[in-house]
Image (spheres, grey):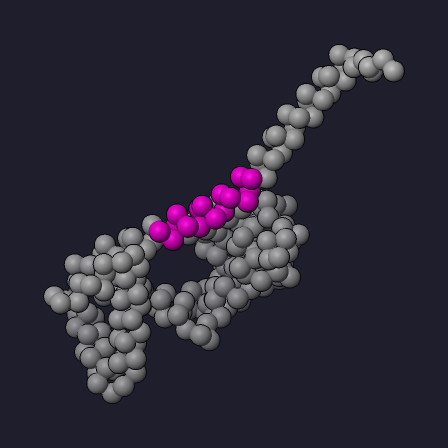
């Protein structure tokens, strides 16, 4: 039987399919490998940063605790845990109260310290209510919506002259959620989302690319 001839169009189609397969395989590899690389790189940067800051504070004779990667981080965690435990007893509360009173007499420092203390207490408190609800708000223009997070429902001291019950909502900027806008909005202007705050935050960071199906696949 004579060999089957291949037309130029079929040769082009085969070559195109091969290129498409190579491209898709490469993109699939990028999607699988880069998250691991980025995660490991970020963890390494954070651990190295903490290690280099903690190492000069380690007392003489305990330098061996920082001779391996992550030693400074473990030492910092252990120290903070010990400080938190000591602050719970009578002597610890007296020391903290004395330090607070001393800082309260410093004009500029007390403002920074007081704000930072309130923020970190709210973040660290197990019973915190901030960022427990993700909502959609009409912002920045009518007819356009963005993701926001309820941060405080007790805003009487801020909006007492408005004459209306308003709720504090933080609207993060994508893809860096640490910068954004603080809005005071009426409750009827908020549209609660069915997804939890951490999932809503993923949508902000990913510029809306992540979907619920992607979360299910990533969890498998």
> Was residue 31 drawn as part of the magenta stretch in this picture?
yes
Can residue 114 be seen here?
Answer: no
Total marks placed:
0
**x then y, percent, for residue 80:** 29, 71
The magenta stretch is 29-44
**x then y, percent, for residue 181:** 45, 51
Q: Vertical placement of 11 versus 109: above or below?
A: above
In front here: 50 or 23? 23
Residue extending farthest to the right is: 1
Residue extending farthest to the front is: 1
In front here: 25 or 164? 25
| Quarter location, residue 108 | bottom left
Residue that appears at 20% across and 63% down: 64
Can residue 36 be seen here?
Answer: yes
Q: Vertical placement of 128 versus 93: above or below?
A: above
Residue extending farthest to the left is: 60
Residue that appears at 31% across and 74% down: 81
Q: Quadrant of the N terminus?
A: top right
**x then y, percent, for residue 93:** 25, 82
Q: Would residue 187 be found to the left or right of residue 36 on screen? A: right
**x then y, percent, for residue 85:** 30, 80
Residue that appears at 17% across and 63% down: 63
| Quarter location, residue 196 | bottom right
Q: Vertical placement of 174 versus 75: above or below?
A: above
Q: Vertical placement of 133 versus 15: above or below?
A: below
Q: Would residue 78 be found to the left or right of residue 170 on screen? A: left
Q: Quadrant of the C terminus?
A: bottom right
Residue extending farthest to the bottom is: 90
Residue that appears at 31% across and 59% down: 70
In front here: 168 or 125? 125
| Quarter location, residue 88 | bottom left
């Amino acid at each position: 039987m004579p060999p089957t001839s291949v037309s130029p169009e079929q040769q082009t189609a085969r070559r195109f399919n091969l290129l498409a397969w190579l491209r898709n395989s490469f993109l699939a590899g990028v999607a699988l490998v880069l998250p691991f690389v980025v995660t490991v790189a970020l963890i390494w940067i954070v651990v190295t940063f903490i290690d280099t800051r903690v190492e000069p504070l380690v007392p003489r004779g305990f330098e061996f605790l920082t001779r391996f990667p992550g030693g400074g981080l473990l030492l910092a965690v252990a120290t903070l845990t010990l400080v938190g435990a000591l602050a719970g007893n009578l002597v610890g509360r007296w020391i903290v109260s004395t330090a607070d009173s001393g800082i309260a007499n410093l004009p500029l420092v007390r403002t920074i310290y007081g704000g930072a203390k309130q923020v970190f207490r709210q973040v660290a408190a197990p019973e915190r209510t901030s960022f427990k609800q993700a909502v959609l708000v009409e912002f920045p223009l009518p007819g356009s919506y963005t993701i926001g997070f309820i941060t405080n429902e007790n805003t009487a001291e801020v909006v007492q002259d408005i004459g209306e019950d308003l709720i504090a909502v933080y609207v993060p900027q994508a893809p860096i959620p640490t910068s954004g806008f603080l809005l005071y909005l009426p409750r009827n202007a908020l549209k609660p989302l069915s997804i939890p705050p951490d999932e809503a935050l993923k949508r902000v960071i990913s510029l809306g690319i992540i979907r619920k199906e992607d979360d299910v696949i990533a969890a498998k």
